[in-house]
Each structure stands twice: as structure tokens, then as C-alpha cells.
Image: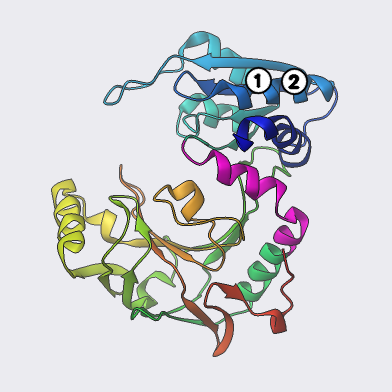
Amino acid sequence: MRTVLYWEEVAEVIVTQLAKVRKGDPFLIVTNANSDLNLAQACLAAGIRAGADTQLVIKPRFVHGTVSKLGPILSSAIRASKIILDLSDELDFDPVTHEARKKGTRVLATNVSGIEEYVVRALLDVDVEAMIRNAQLVKKLWEQTRQFHITSPQGTDLTFEMKAAKVTVGDGALSEDGEIDFFPGAQVNIDHHNTPSQETINGKIVVDASDSIQGLVHNPYTLVIEKGVITRIEGGREADVVREYLEKLNEPKVYKLVHTSIGLNPQARFSGNLVQDERVLAALDFGFGRDCPYHEDFMVSTPTIYLDGREMSGGGKLNPEMGFEEM
């Protein structure tokens, strides 16, 4: 497979360009026994080549339905590390990780299981620096915008005002102490949570690509949004599944839209795995639920985004007239 053949090259990019590991850094790599260990071992070798104090920890095989606890050995290693590469994507919610980040530890996370070929393409077949520049341009444009209008060929028609909403870039690389980021990049996110923008979100989202409940979506369905909250779910069987699933959670906060995110990786394709789906070029991810145990994501494949009436993207492409580069 191309993945195995290219893991050494991929690991070099991850360790030196994304995690930015340097000589003498206490560098911890964490994976689990469910994963292909070839990438973890390649990253271990890359960290050693970089001159870092590099350690690899393999967590026990995760059993679905059980609570995964870190234990004293891994907890101590996390506290002692300057940079952590989390190939299990299981550390971000643990209190020990939060404690370490408050003291400056940086965390770069992913889970490549099932999307190995994509990870290779996303890191080796993309101009990563151009992608990051495009992400910064999206951030700049969004921060200057007063009103968003989003449409799609399937019927999405959603508007909202920014009103102090926070815009952040998830470029898949570490640049400051205490940061956590996920790779491969890139995404740009609007955080609506507890901002005046949240109550200005009105219209409908036609989910036509994937969601975090079912994976790939084969028959589009509609989320009706009023003041940032899902009030109705319309459509066929897939809509019924989503409606019934959310009702069983019995959690009103999961209906509240908390982020809108655009993907910027030209090698990403819809797969049903959100690590890849959320990065599809010019696709939108709408995330619902915060301050509760649940968070659900819904993807629109080819939306058109208007910023104060000017088209920024559409048809799966960014508008070059606004300064975007080829990647």
C-alpha cells in the first residue's frame, strides 16, 4: 500500500513541519493498540532524527463502551512533555491533558484509521503553506464581514450576522504554547457559542454529504434553524434517524448551532469519517451542542458562501478574485 511505503516521509512532515519538534524537546507520541503502528514508529524515528527526547507510548486496545483511563505512567509522561503527538485522538478531553496544556504543553492530534490513503495525499500532495495562507485569508475576510448568506444547490438557505463571533484557524500545525490542533489541516471556524451572532442564525441547512450520526448521507434532509436552534428536521428515513437519535439524548443544548467551519484541503473527499469530511475544500461543517456531553456535526458538500453579498466560494472552489491561491 502507498500508505506504508510513504509513512516515513509523512512522519517527517508531521514531526518537523506540523509539530515543529526541535532538538532537546521532550516529545511524546501516543497511539493505541487498535491502530497501525507503522506511522507511530515512523514518527518515533523522525523525532529521534530531530534530536528530541522522544518516547512512544502504546495504550491498551480500546473496548467500546468502557471508559479509557490514562493511568499514572502515561499521566506522568504527558505532564513531562513539551510536545505531544496524539495518534489515538483520545487525550484532548482528559483532565491531565488540560493540566499540561495550561503549563504550555502543545498537542497535535489525529486518528488515521480508515483514512490512511487520505492522510498521505493531504500531507504530501498539497502545498501546505499555500493552504495555510488561504486559511489566514478566510479568517481575515470573515472577521471583516457583517452578514453571511449560505446557499446550496440542494436548497440550503441560511443567514447570520457576525456580531463578535470568534474566528479561528485550524491549520493542523502547532505554533504556540498550550495549543491543541488536529491534522491534516485545514479548517477555519466561526464560534457562535454564547455570542450575539447565535440568535441571528435563521434559515435551513440541507445536509447532503455526511453527519456524525450516520456517516455518509445518501438522501439529503433539512435542518430548520430559528435563532440558532434546530426547530424541525425534515426529510425521509435518514432525517427520521437523526430526529430519533437527538430526541433520545434528551438534551436541549445539542440542538444549538455552536460553530460553522469551512474545509480547505483539496485532497479531502467525503468518506463518512469526519476527520476527512470536515476538511473537504469549500464544504461546510455545522456543529451543534456545547456545554453538554454531546456534539453533532452535519456537512454540506458544495455550498455558496456570500460575504456581505460578495461570493467567496461555491461549487467546491474558492473565488480566486478574492486572492485565494491554488493548492
Asked where in the image residue 101 lies, by quadrant, the reply is top right
The three-letter code of the residue at mark 2 reads: Ala
> Which residue bears the numbered disc 1?
41
Query: Can residue 148 be seen in this snapshot?
Result: yes
Q: Nearer the viewer, residue 166 or 259?
A: 259
Give the image location of residue 142, x and y in percent: 60, 73
> Which residue bears the numbered disc 2?
45
Give the image location of residue 265, x and y in percent: 61, 58
Q: Nearer the viewer, residue 197 or 205?
A: 205
Q: Is residue 73 magenta?
A: no
Q: Are marks 2 and 1 in contact (CB under 8 Å)?
A: yes
Secondary element type, mark 2 = helix
139 lies left or right of 53: left
The three-letter code of the residue at mark 1 reads: Gln
Q: CA distance from mark 2 to mark 1?
A: 6 Å
Q: Residue at x 50, y 50 (%)?
A: 276
Report the magenta residues as a range: 114-133
Q: Quadrant of the C terminus?
A: bottom right
